[in-house]
């Protein structure tokens, strides 16, 4: 349960970083600049923020996949299933017959 909470916090922290960068761009672009270099800088800033957001979202998606795989592995190893019960029963029967 603690791991799930940490995972949720990690998601939130990463998304907050993307939001902060976007807010910075919005506030910075609201300032009145008439210089072409400033417009270029704003465009570059926006591209950088969009790239950052895309990378963060892609990484979160990848980590979600890894996390789900780990959950499945743990559940397979810790929760008895019909298959594991059947294997154990067969092994017990085999040992009794010796």
Image: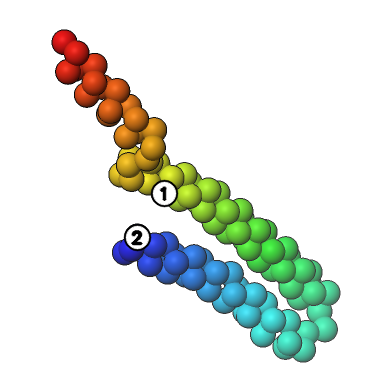
Name of the residue lying farthest toward the top? 98
Residue 59 seen: no
The residue indicated by pointer 2 is: 3
Residue 19, by quadrant, is bottom right
Question: Reading the chain from its start, which is encountered first: label 2 or label 1?
Answer: 2
- Is 93 located above or below residue 75 in the figure? above
Separation of disc 2 and disc 1 at Cα? 11 Å
Question: Where residue 26 appears, x then y in whole percent?
Answer: 69, 81
Residue 80 visible in the shown view: yes
Give the residue at x 39% y 62%: 4
Q: Residue at x 78, y 84 (%)?
A: 33
Secondary structure state at the residue bearing disc 1: helix
Q: Residue at x 39, y 33 (%)?
A: 83
Front position in the image: 37 or 69 = 69
Q: Which residue is mark 1?
A: 71
**Number of other residues with Cα within 10 Å of mark 1, as a class: few under 14, some 14 to 19, many 20 or more:** few
**Which quarter of the rendered picture does the N terminus lie within?**
bottom left
Secondary structure of the residue carrying numbered label 2: helix
Q: Is residue 88 above or below residue 33?
A: above
Task: Locate residue 90, reporting x and y percent.
Answer: 29, 23
Q: Position of residue 80 (x, y in %)?
A: 32, 42
Give residue 95's position: percent from left, percent from top: 18, 17
Q: Nearer the viewer, mark 2 or mark 1?
A: 1
Do the numbered discs 2 and 1 sit on residues whose CB atoms are within 8 Å?
A: no
Query: Residue at 63% across / 63% down in the picture?
Result: 53
**Snapshot quadrant of residue 77:** top left
């Amino acid at each position: 349960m603690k791991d799930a909470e940490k995972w949720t916090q990690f998601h939130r922290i990463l998304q907050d970083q993307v939001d902060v960068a976007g807010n910075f761009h919005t506030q910075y672009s609201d300032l009145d600049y008439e210089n072409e270099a400033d417009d270029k800088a704003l465009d570059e800033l926006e591209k950088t923020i969009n790239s950052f957001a895309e990378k963060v979202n892609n990484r979160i998606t990848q980590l979600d996949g890894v996390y789900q795989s780990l959950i499945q592995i743990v559940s397979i190893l810790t929760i008895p299933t019909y298959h594991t019960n059947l294997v154990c029963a067969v092994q017990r029967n085999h040992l009794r017959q010796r």
